Image (tube, rainbow, N blue to C red):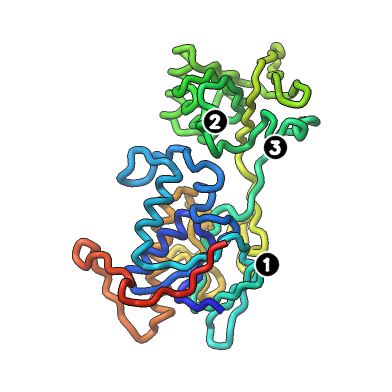
Amino acid sequence: MIKTDIIIIGAGPVGLFAVFEAGLMKLRCHLIDAIPQPGGQLSEIYPKKPIYDIPGYPSVLAGELVDKLMEQAAPFKPGFTLGERADSIEKQDDGSFIVTTSKGTQHHAPVVMIAGGLGSFEPRKPLISNIGDFEEKGVRYIVKDPDQFEGKDMVISGGGDSALDWAIYFAEKGSFVHLVHRSDRYRAHKDSVSRAQELAAAGKMKLHTFAEVKELNGDDDLTAVVIHTKAANTTVETELWFPLFGLSPKLGPIGDWGLDIEKNAIVVDTFDYQTNRPGVFAIGDVNTYPGKLKLILCGFHEATLAVQTAYKIINPDKKFTLKYTTVQGVQGFEDEQPKQTITS
């Protein structure tokens, strides 16, 4: 049995930052994640994708942000159970919780914070009959290691931030990019749309609007895609097609934990981001409330407030006075023995 103050389900950026905020209040954390390394989607899906909306960083690679968050949390010696999915949560007579993983590892704490991001997920795939024949043979749904694709001509489909960010990235790295979108209105940041248009005007990118990739050609590997529009069909020779239509999220076992669920997200009280089950919090993309924005920086804010109430639950007879870190500094647990740590 692994015992700690706060069990954090999800070792993504919000979960890692919660470790820091809890550590400032002398609370220990243990994180559980089905992915075999910390960082969540930032590590698993796009470690080299630049992120632009983290305060203090005009631009930071996703993997670098994870490294910095791990460094920030390190003084507080968090424990990790990685490569194991949190399957069940059981409330004890004293109000505490036992969380058991898919491999039977049990964790005991008075507070649980769910920071599971989008939960389990799979890419949204276009309805093309032979798309499965070319998966990992030219068709890729995520860009995990962009270095291997730099300088290669490619087709990217999508109109959101991910599609435009990668189209811009590769065009600036010497690739010629065909960006295909079903509309002429993009869901990405305006700056990204403007930059894509600039690259297209410079001859480094071609924008196909009111268009869709409908056919794939090739023998063993992809050799061409056919882009359909109302006016005509265009065949583009390419060995790379990235249909970046986002991820289809699924809460997985969390959906069976007696929590209020709305549109595949956990309903929380914005006072402290506690769920309908006292002592269980949900922070980051996994939660929902009026005005919710699925941004990492919003998850950081939610983690900060959640930890304040967590402290009161764990220490009902103590009063904690919040001080600025410029005054109190950052004091870790150097003089204490760390709790058990599991890595898979």
Residue density around tag 3, few if under 14, some if 14–19, many if 20 or more, within 10 Å: some
Task: Please name which of the two marks, 2 or 3, marks the residue nearer to the observer.
Answer: 2
Q: Name the residue under label 2.
A: 148
Q: Name the residue under label 3.
A: 125
Distance between the alpha carbons at the discs numbered 3 and 1: 27 Å
In the displayed structure, would residue 62 be above or below residue 331? above
Secondary structure found at label 2 = helix
**Residue at 60 percent of width and 75 percent of height:** 106
Q: Name the residue under label 1.
A: 256
Task: Please name which of the two marks, 1 or 2, marks the residue nearer to the observer.
Answer: 2
> In the rendered structure, which disc, 2 or 3, sits on the residue that comes first in sequence?
3
Q: In this view, does 129 lie to the left or right of 257?
A: right
> Badges 1 and 2: C-beta atoms under 8 Å apart?
no
- Specify the amino acid type for callout 3: Lys
- The outermost residue toward the right is 129
**Residue at 45 percent of width and 63 percent of height:** 270
Q: Can residue 258 be seen in this view?
A: no
| Label at residue 132 | none
Give whichever of 31, 303 is nearer the camera: 31
Residue density around tag 1, few if under 14, some if 14–19, many if 20 or more, within 10 Å: few
